[in-house]
Amino acid sequence: MTNSDINRYKDKAFQIFGIFCTLIGLVVLAVFLIDIAIDGISRIDWDFLTSLPSRRASSAGIYTAWAGTLWILVLTAVIAFPLGVGAAVYLEEYSRKTKLANFLEINIANLAGVPSIIYGLLGLEIFVRQMRLGGSLLAGALTLSLLILPIIIVTTRESIKAVPRSVRDGSYALGASKWQTIWNQVLPASFGGILTGIILALSRAVGEAAPLIVIGALAYVPFAPTTPLDEFTVLPIQIFNWTSRPQEAFLTNAAGAIIVLLCITFLLNGIAVYLRLRQQKKVKW
Amino acid sequence: MSKKVYKLEAKNLNAYYGNFHALKGIDIAMEEKAVTAFIGPSGCGKSTFLRTFNRMNDFIEGFRTEGDILLDGRDIYDKKIRVDELRKEVGMVFQKPNPFPKSIFENVVYGLRLQGIKNKAVLQETAEKSLQRAALWSEVKDNLNKSALALSGGQQQRLCIARALAISPSVLLMDEPASALDPISTAKIEELIHELKNDYTIVIVTHNMQQAGRVSDYTAFFYMGELVEHSKTKALFTSPSDTRTQNYITGRFG
Amino acid sequence: MFHLNSTFSTLRKSEKIIEGLLWLSATITILVTVGIIWVLLSESVSFFSEVSIVEFLTEKEWTPLFADKKFGILPLVAGTFLTTFIAIAVALPIGLTIAIYLNEYAHGTFRAIIKPLLEVLATIPTVVYGFFALTVVTPFLQQFIPGLAGFNALSAGIVMGIMIIPMISSLSEDAISAVPRSLREAAYGMGSTRLQTAFGVMVPAASSGILVSIILAISRAVGETMIVAIAAGQQPRLTLNPLVPIETITTYIVQVSLGDVPHGSLEYRTIFAAGLTLFIFTFALNNISFWIKKKYQEKYD
């Protein structure tokens, strides 16, 4: 066998290893989804979705948990959307290339790398204690808003950057002010991209348990929240709680709740992917 | 005897991009309701100069001017001047058609909406008038709600002209308005310029000397940031007084 | 004649107000950083006024919730290090191989299908991974490893590694595909196989970008909470044995948060001291990665 034969075999071997590695993650993912489905799908019925939590696994439901998750989703969106887009517009359109702008940029990159549980500690001290919001939905949504702020800012900036100079020039040449140009041209043209980023960020927020546990969201809440100042639980916390019980029946409940949570996450991601594809198909400038 | 007030005037205008001296001591006066063409090789400063008249250069970091630019005898770089008001008075058409990603109708009335005009009848009427003036009305009148991006390049450019006319400026700046278009569309734009000069003062930058000859009353030749020569178009092309102009129009450089 | 300075002062004023509001939203990001540092520091300062920093850094036991209180962070750091190490040991070879395979071997269509599927791994909530580690991976591994406890660093680390694969693969792939075409063509032009091109030219040329992906993955693993809280146990111990229950910094914070520790007590403050430790680790890792990235960008510009 010549040297180049050996090299060719090595090359082939690596190719097979490459396929193996690429597929192993997906195989694990598949195993995992199937396992959850087998464990949990039989548990999902109308009662499970509409029952309050209970100490008995068979009568426990996830009503309070998914109601809490929806509340958190909406409140976080309402808080994080204007803040994140506002910050991105400022950084992209207003701020000059100063030291402050540079600092803001590094700072945002740093915030994106702060572990979510640290945001929980921040929320605990600032929102729960200083602002006396307690372990309420509002405190939770504020905490998660800060957590996803860097993601929203980064994706919004990218979308704004993609709006061509010529559109802005056209607007300015007709006597538009800076804000008029941003509001009438830049934001509508980049809206698809901004929305995609926000939905992806929200899907991240919906899956978070750690920061909410730290701010004192409870595993057991007897009623679904009705105002932003009510105590709450969310699906990930409910799953965590059931997973840490020794009884097999609670694990089945957890699997059922996971299916619901994954449906929400995949739905959000699906919408984001759809929006992105539609954006790409739109007429190019 | 009062001094004559020109529509547009530059007095000893110098402009810089950072350290680069882009326009050098330019003096020029342009008559009302006439077409003036700016010609010259790439990088000679003609586009920069054009963009000082509606202060589009303000966006470029490090850009500054010395000297005066006068519109109806008033300095437009004066601190009291509102740039957005200036741009309503001095419309602009760009090199590449740049319609907004909106409907044809919304493109035309954009300038009016900026001024807070919401009256449907007024918007409708202005849109129709502007599109007619820009010789586009017959082609789009049934599709006003169609996206402007679906129009052809030549139609898009006429839409951009209609958009500029809708806010009734008195000056129209055109930065190589036909350079991205096919010959037929170019002819339509040139025809349009002929029509428009009855009501507007037009300044057009062009690379195409035949075009300058066809559309303009006056021509100014720029070279390396200097205004070399400015006179009646016919005179400039038939008997240039400067050898640089001579060389340029005979195709020796540029 | 026209009137250039007709006063639209209301318009001008509202423009200023809007700019102010936008500025405010941008500066909130600074307030968040300041807030994090302030919260962690102020509670930690009270903590260290009662517990010496020497004990914190050298004591080998962490028992703040027991009668015999000891405050040595080392067991938590060891637990964090252990799960992180296992996660990277799983994610790095797989992630890097995927990056190389997709870049040098795979067809465009295959890549277009695989990449979004891999991204799915990153979108699954971590609590779900934790469930998987506890109920699937641990029982599975127990068939082969007799001494494996129900809670252990191994399962948690492996599952965390799977979660991190797309992070390493996509960042490394970006780095590899940023290597100038000419370099790759030169390698092929000299008769290299794809493998030789990949490891002889592409990986070394993209090494700083790959390093960045690894560091960011480490930072992510260090701060990961729910997987370890569910599957790795809650027993702080100074060990590198992956088969027994341990506790990470993040798990400890969750453990205290779930209990009834009175606010203002020393036990309550321990979570901020632990949080500060965690923050220092991730902050350092992130900044090292920015620094490398900056140098790397200069190289190719």
Image: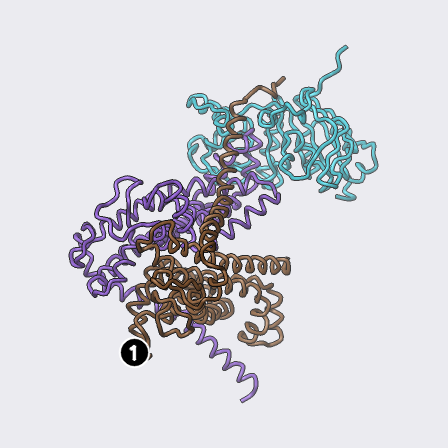
Chain colours: A purple, B cyan, C brown
Parent chain of label 1: C
Mark 1 surroundings: few (<14), some (14-19) or many (≥20) residues within 10 A: few
Where is residue A144 drawn, in percent x and y? 39, 48
Q: Nearer the viewer, residue B221 or C143?
A: C143
Question: Which quadrant would residue B10 be assigned to in this image?
Answer: top right
Where is residue A113 drawn, in percent x and y? 48, 55
Q: Residue at x 74, y 38 (%)?
A: B22
Q: From the viewer's perspective, is A58 left or right of A95?
A: left
Which secondary structure, mark 1?
loop
Question: Which quadrant would residue B80 be assigned to in this image?
Answer: top right
Q: Nearer the viewer, residue A271 or C261?
A: C261
Q: Nearer the viewer, residue C17 or A3?
A: C17
Q: Is residue A160 visible?
A: yes
The residue furthest top is B1
In which quadrant will I find the C terminus of chain B? top right
Number of labelled discs?
A: 1
Where is residue C297 drawn, in percent x and y? 61, 58
Q: Is residue C287 above or below residue A74?
A: below
In which quadrant will I find the N terminus of chain B? top right
Q: Nearer the viewer, residue A147 or A151?
A: A147
Q: Is residue C165 visible?
A: no
Q: From the viewer's perspective, is B41 left or right of A58?
A: right
Q: Residue at x 55, y 48 (%)?
A: A105
Q: Is residue C19 above or below residue C10?
A: below
Residue type beneath disc 1 = Gln
The residue indicated by pointer 1 is C143
Where is residue A265 drawn, in percent x and y? 33, 54
The residue furthest bottom is A1
Q: Is residue B163 above or below residue C99?
A: above
